[in-house]
Amino acid sequence: MYSNFARKVNRGIADIYYLEEDGRIASGAIATKYGDDSMYITFVSTSPQHRKKGLAARVIGHIISCSGDKKVILKCEDELKPFYEKLGFKAVGTITVYKE
């Protein structure tokens, strides 16, 4: 799946958004067009030493502000739903993650 998003970034279909602290990436996400009327956010990540500072919320908020009138979609693990609901997302289904 990563290579699919990397190809989209390289073709200008997806964008990488990130925040730096002390010259290093602290938090980031990838946003890609999803159909004609939607944007899909994936690979949201914050380095462990930068968590609990609101950085992922800032990155996502910026992506949303850039989305215009497009619907913004993301998938997350159930345990992260409360975080995304605080940002205005609404749970409409579930995702099952296989863990060894």
Image: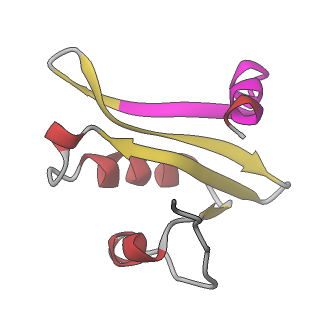
Quadrant of the drawing holding the N terminus:
top right
Place of residue 14 in the rendered image (x, y in percent of width and height, measured from the top left): 68, 34
User: For this rendering, which residue is in front, 66 or 31?
Assistant: 31
Residue at 27% across / 37% down in the picture?
47
Range shown magenta = 4-18
Q: Would you say 69 lies left or right of 88 here?
A: right
Give the image's coloring scheme: secondary structure
The answer to whether residue 5 is magenta is yes
Position of residue 14 relative to residue 41, above or below, is above
Position of residue 34 relative to residue 15, above or below, is below
Q: Would you say 74 lies left or right of 29 here?
A: right
Residue at 79% across / 22% down in the picture?
11
User: For this rendering, which residue is in front, 43 or 22?
Assistant: 43
Q: Residue furthest front?
A: 100
Place of residue 32 in the rendered image (x, y in percent of width and height, measured from the top left): 68, 43
Place of residue 29 in the rendered image (x, y in percent of width and height, measured from the top left): 48, 41
Q: Would you say 7 lies left or right of 58 here?
A: right
